Amino acid sequence: SFAHSPPMLSSPWFAALLIVNLLSLAGSGWILITILSRGPEFRRRLLPRQLLSLAAADSVLHCLSLFYVIFELGDETWWAFMQRPICGWFYVVFRIGRCISVVQEMHIAVVQLVQTQRWLRTLEFLTRSVLICWVIGLGLGVA
């Protein structure tokens, strides 16, 4: 139980989780900026749209993960009256973001398989289904 645990701000796990989340946020931001700075004809292609969607989902995931780490592993006296409700809601949204990221990654992998097998009808469907991954991930994250 975190209610009786000692402060974790000096813990190596806290530092590692903090660094990993910050690096992931930086990577997602770089992908978003790089793709958005290209022309519209580039952004209309399937892989850039998939990467934009994945970077957006990962940005939400790692931003919330960062807050979750700070609130959950932080000092007990720091925001103690709000710690549990905030962490509960952050975890729910974190879980949704994680599911959306996983579905996005699976979509990229399936498209690569479909392209190598030259299944054109399936590829046409997958080209139009990038946003459906958000709906599926949201449903899996809430369930």
Image (cartoon, rainbow, N blue to C red):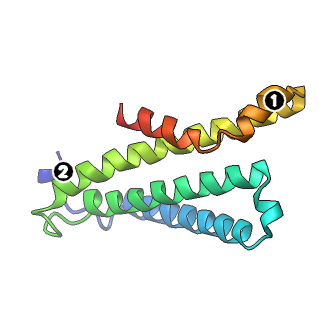
Q: Secondary structure at mark 1?
A: helix
Left or right: where 80 falls relative to 139: left
Give me the residue at 40% from left, 62% from top: 66
Residue 5 visible within the image: no
Is 92 above or below relative to 17? above
From this viewpoint, is residue 90 visible? yes
Q: Pinpoint residue 70: horizontal percent, then vertical percent.
A: 32, 64
- x, y (%) of residue 78? 17, 70
- Residue corresponding to mark 1: 114
Q: Earlier in the sequence, mark 2 or mark 1?
A: 2
Q: Position of residue 42 (x, y in %)?
A: 82, 61
Determine the secondary structure under disc 2. helix
Read off the residue under disc 2: 2
Nearest the viewer among 10 and 59 is: 59
The residue carrying pointer 1 sits among few (fewer than 14), some (14 to 19) or many (20 or more) residues within 10 Å by Cα, namely some
The image quadrant that residue 128 belongs to is top right
User: How far apart in space, not on screen, are marks 2 and 1 (Cα)?
Assistant: 47 Å
Residue 127 shown left or right of residue 99 in the figure: right
Kind of residue sitting beneath label 2: Phe
Q: Is residue 96 above or below residue 70?
A: above
Seen in the picture, residue 33 relative to 45 is either above or below; the reply is below
Q: Residue at x 18, y 59 (%)?
A: 83
Residue at 12% across, 52% down: 3
Under mark 1, the amino acid is Val
Task: Quadrant for the N terminus, please.
Answer: top left
